[in-house]
Image (cartoon, helix red, strand yellow):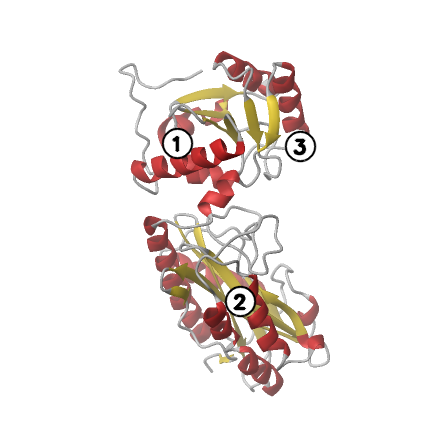
């Protein structure tokens, strides 16, 4: 086990995205939720939540290890459990008070032993069962040992997620910066698109444009759908298909600042305008204004989402509507940037439109006969003054430069 410096003060990690006071505030809010839920110790394993609470950031997490943070509701110290091969990283880049290093094979026993040594044997422990990491058999082994040691295990899912749904002033700064990056990159893409480029090249080019403007790598590569099968290719990887004159091209990306994602999607035409795609996008464009008008501070988002959905369905035939809706954004790691709450309030948890709530808003349309997908995706931020639309780009069919 590694501990803090000999003077009793924890080492100050380098490269943290936010001031230490921001992390302390986050932890205090999480502890308040733990207290209301009767959780004594929270074992955090979600990559996004590890970043939120301690600045832990990685492109890969060993699913054979219960890498995580243990947060005691009554004590300020935070214990980090990490791979022994990460010794250099976790000791210099993660905001924690002590480190327990783990190895394959004996990790569950090491976690259980550390919990007992810290006096948590008779405590209620919250576990993030819905985390993408580690693998289920690993957490099952850990939970069995913790239970044998006398701990009562309860669900710790969404405790941290619900706190970080509502962005602080410092986080909103990142969100606004990411929104500007996304707009700038998409405008440049409009100028750069040419027949003959492959979908893969468009995706890579947009990723470069985003990086050149200050974006980090997003949780997913930019999505690109084109050609006569685009209506069936939603969520498919960009392909080797080459763009042709007359194509309708739907592009979906995120700009990222300090892991905070802002989603933006627009549809382009190459050469001759596709009148049907242009008409559909024009008819739906103002639905976001209906969402904005109906959104009420402190209320659930479902009424505003229903108003926007009604706006679209009164104007566009149901067979051409793939989805009208949205989901929470914020900290994202692979495999996706999709949050756990939705504008329709039918996600894994309920939510309210409190100040700082960040969501995307999608209107996605398909036309099988004419062979296109046409989509418009924006990000919206709830503020004390109402719902703010973060992109300034037009929401119709955008003509690529000739």
Residue at the spot x=61%, y=30% of the render?
154
Residue 171: percent from left, percent from top = 36, 50
Specify whether residue 367 is in view: no
Q: How far is disc 2 from disc 1 in space, using C-alphas?
A: 39 Å
Q: Are marks 2 and 1 in contact (CB under 8 Å)?
A: no
Residue at the spot x=47%, y=74% of the render?
289
Secondary structure type for disc 1: loop
111 relative to 373, above or below: above
Disc 1 packing (10 Å; few <14; some 14–19; many ≥20): many
Toward which corner of the image does residue 112 lie, by quadrant? Answer: top right
Residue 19: percent from left, percent from top = 30, 40
Q: How far is disc 3 from disc 2 in space, using C-alphas?
A: 37 Å
- Residue ID for mark 2: 304
* Residue sitting nearer the eye, 136 or 310: 310
Secondary structure type for disc 3: helix
Disc 2 packing (10 Å; few <14; some 14–19; many ≥20): many
Q: Nearer the viewer, mark 3 or mark 2?
A: 2
Q: How far is disc 3 from disc 1 in space, using C-alphas?
A: 25 Å
Residue at the spot x=67%, y=32% of the render?
136
- Residue ID for mark 1: 94
378 relative to 128, above or below: below
- Residue ID for mark 3: 136
Residue 228 appears left or right of 244: right
Marked residue nearer the N-terminal end (3 or 1): 1
* Residue sitting nearer the eye, 240 or 92: 92
Toward which corner of the image does residue 276 lie, by quadrant? Answer: bottom right
Residue at the spot x=38%, y=23% of the render?
97
């Amino acid at each position: 086990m590694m501990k803090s410096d000999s003077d009793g003060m924890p080492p100050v990690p380098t490269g943290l995205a936010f001031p230490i006071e921001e992390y302390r505030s986050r932890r205090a809010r999480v502890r308040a939720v733990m207290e209301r839920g009767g959780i004594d110790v929270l074992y955090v394993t979600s990559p996004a939540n590890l970043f939120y609470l301690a600045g832990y950031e990685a492109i890969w997490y060993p699913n054979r290890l219960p890498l995580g943070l243990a947060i005691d509701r009554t004590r300020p110290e935070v214990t980090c459990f990490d791979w022994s091969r990460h010794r250099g990283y976790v000791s210099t880049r993660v905001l924690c008070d002590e480190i327990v290093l783990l190895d394959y094979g004996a990790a569950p026993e090491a976690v259980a032993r550390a919990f007992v040594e810290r006096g948590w044997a008779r405590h209620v422990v919250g576990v993030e069962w819905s985390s993408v990491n580690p693998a289920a058999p690993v957490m099952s082994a850990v939970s069995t040992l913790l239970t044998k040691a006398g701990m009562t295990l309860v669900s710790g899912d969404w405790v941290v997620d619900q706190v970080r749904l509502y962005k602080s002033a410092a986080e909103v700064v990142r969100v606004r910066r990411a929104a500007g990056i996304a707009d700038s990159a998409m405008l440049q893409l409009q100028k750069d698109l040419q027949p003959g480029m492959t979908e893969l090249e468009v995706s890579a080019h947009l990723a470069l444009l985003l990086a050149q403007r200050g974006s980090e790598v997003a949780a997913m590569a930019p999505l690109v759908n084109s050609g006569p099968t685009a209506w069936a290719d939603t969520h498919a990887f960009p392909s080797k298909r080459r763009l042709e004159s007359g194509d309708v091209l739907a592009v979906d990306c995120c700009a990222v600042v300090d892991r905070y994602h802002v989603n933006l999607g627009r549809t382009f035409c190459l050469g001759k305008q596709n009148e049907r795609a242009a008409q559909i996008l024009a008819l739906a464009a103002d639905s976001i204004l209906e969402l904005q008008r109906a959104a009420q501070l402190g209320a659930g988002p479902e009424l505003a989402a229903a108003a926007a959905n009604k706006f679209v369905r009164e104007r566009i035939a149901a067979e051409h509507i793939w989805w009208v809706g949205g989901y929470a954004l914020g900290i994202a790691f692979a495999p996706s940037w999709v949050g756990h709450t939705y504008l329709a309030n039918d996600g894994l948890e309920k939510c309210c439109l409190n100040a700082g709530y960040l969501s995307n808003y999608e209107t996605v349309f398909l036309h099988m006969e004419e062979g296109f997908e046409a989509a418009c995706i924006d990000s919206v931020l709830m503020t004390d003054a109402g719902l703010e639309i973060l992109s300034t780009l037009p929401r119709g069919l955008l003509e690529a430069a000739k």
